[in-house]
């Protein structure tokens, strides 16, 4: 025991209990006055809490008046003591009722400074408690949006820097005479310029998608001519990659937005071409799913495939699967755009099991919403 600690005790049955020795055993939250006790949290209505507050004040004042009359206390002293007791009861109960509002005020001020990590203790069941829960949900959403914004800026900066640096190096070598403007050198510059163009185009697509500026215009169309025309358009991306189109039945039709579906399949085919080996085959398979106008579309390649641990992340922005890097020509945005367009149709896109390569499956309902 600390000899310098002031001693105060209670005598009980001949034994002195030192209250100074009892303080360390109290919970730290109570010793520091933390936790903001809320005795009325179990009530589900703010009106009920106000009623309890009034009843408690009336009960305390009545009890003190009765005790004062029995003890023959002067009326003015009785009035002072009763008022102080009612004020104390009101302060204790009202403090717990308004505690979430004070916490929300402090958290809102922190958010104004850019700190989205603050949360409010939402333990009450009344309107204020539900407001605190909604506030916490909003704070979590704002924190996620801010984190995604920071990640987007960092990723876009990195993706733009890579082709710009490569293009700068090529042009600098041409100006310094280190390299001659032969077809290979100019082809390298053209490749980096094309990559910049793809990145800017996909960023514009993402901006339109996020703003909801790309509404669906669904109609019924024939699937096989659609896929054949698409493979002919994107054939240049595949180099020596061959395409196989398998549609069952051959006259299969689907109801969807052809422009948005074109985005989906183009990005999936481009992704398959990037990861396919020399002379590989990219297969497009389509069949009817459950429901009239529905569609099950699969794109298969003969590349290294996507590890199981990464399949849930490949549809996130700036995520590359299968060991790809930022220098392989991809941007990491194609699958994110494909997922958004599929979600817009009310469908589903996923990486399906495959014995070899990668298989991405798209399921579209008959009537997109």
Image (cartoon, rainbow, N blue to C red):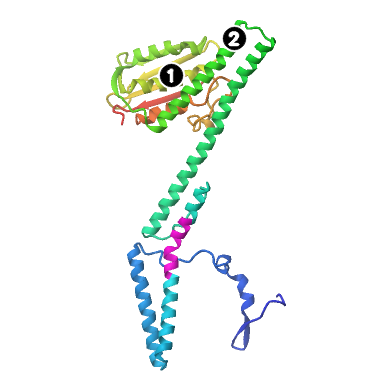
* 104 magenta-colored: yes
Q: Nearer the viewer, residue 107 or 311?
A: 107
Give residue 92's position: percent from left, percent from top. 45, 71
Give residue 279's position: percent from left, percent from top. 53, 10
Q: Which residues are magenta?
A: 93-105
Give how far apart the Cα atoms at labels 1 and 2 are.
Answer: 26 Å
Sequence-earlier tag: 1 or 2: 2
From what the image shows, is residue 330 above or below residue 238? below
Q: Secondary structure at mark 2?
A: helix
Q: What residue would you read off at disc 2?
A: 186
- The residue located at (46%, 22%) in the rendering is 201
From what the image shows, is residue 364 above or below residue 169? below
From what the image shows, is residue 172 above or below residue 345? above
Q: Is residue 177 left or right of residue 269?
A: right
Q: Nearer the viewer, residue 109 or 352?
A: 109
Give residue 364's position: percent from left, percent from top. 35, 27
Dominant secondary structure of the residues highlighted in magenta in the image: helix
Q: Which label number is shown at residue 256?
A: none
* 328 magenta-colored: no
Disc 1: CA contacts within 10 A as few (<14), some (14-19) or many (>=20): some
Q: Quadrant of the N terminus?
A: bottom right
Q: Secondary structure at mark 1?
A: helix
Label 1 or label 2, whichever lies nearer to me, is 2
Determine the residue located farthest toward the front in the rendered image.
175
Q: What residue would you read off at disc 1?
A: 266
Give residue 345's position: percent from left, percent from top. 34, 29
The quarter holding residue 341 reads top left
Determine the residue located farthest toward the bottom in the rendered image.
72
């Amino acid at each position: 025991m600390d000899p310098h600690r002031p001693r105060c005790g209670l005598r009980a049955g001949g034994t002195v209990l030192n209250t100074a020795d009892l303080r360390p055993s109290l919970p730290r939250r109570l010793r520091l006055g933390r936790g903001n006790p809320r005795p009325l949290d179990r009530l589900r209505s703010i009106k009920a809490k106000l009623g309890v507050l009034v009843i408690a004040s009336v009960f305390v004042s009545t009890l003190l008046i009765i005790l004062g009359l029995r003890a023959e206390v002067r009326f003015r002293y009785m009035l002072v003591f009763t008022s102080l007791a009612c004020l104390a009861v009101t302060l204790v109960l009202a403090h717990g009722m308004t505690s979430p509002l004070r916490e929300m005020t402090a958290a809102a001020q922190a958010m104004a400074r850019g700190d989205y990590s603050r949360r409010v203790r939402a333990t009450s069941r009344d309107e204020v408690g539900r407001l605190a829960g909604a506030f916490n949900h909003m704070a979590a959403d704002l924190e996620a949006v801010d984190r995604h914004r920071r990640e987007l800026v960092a990723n876009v900066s990195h993706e733009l820097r890579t082709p710009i640096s490569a293009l700068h190096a090529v042009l600098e070598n041409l100006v310094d005479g280190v390299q001659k403007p032969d077809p290979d050198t100019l082809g390298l510059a053209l490749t980096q310029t094309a990559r910049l163009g793809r990145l800017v185009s996909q960023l514009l697509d993402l901006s339109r998608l996020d703003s909801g500026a790309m509404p669906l215009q669904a109609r019924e169309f024939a699937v096989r001519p659609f896929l054949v025309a698409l493979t002919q358009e994107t054939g240049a991306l595949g180099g020596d990659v061959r395409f196989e189109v398998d549609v069952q039945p051959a006259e299969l039709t689907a109801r969807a937005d052809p422009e948005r579906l074109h985005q989906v399949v183009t990005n999936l085919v481009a992704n398959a071409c990037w990861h396919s080996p020399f002379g590989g085959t990219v297969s497009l398979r389509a069949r009817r799913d459950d429901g009239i106008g529905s569609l099950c579309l699969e794109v298969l390649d003969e590349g290294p495939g996507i590890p199981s641990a990464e399949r849930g992340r490949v549809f996130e922005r700036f995520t590359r699967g299968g060991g790809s890097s930022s220098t392989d020509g991809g941007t990491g945005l194609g699958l994110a755009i494909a997922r958004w367009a599929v979600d817009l149709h009310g469908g589903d896109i996923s990486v399906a099991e495959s014995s070899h390569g990668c298989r991405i499956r798209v399921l579209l309902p008959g009537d997109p919403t």
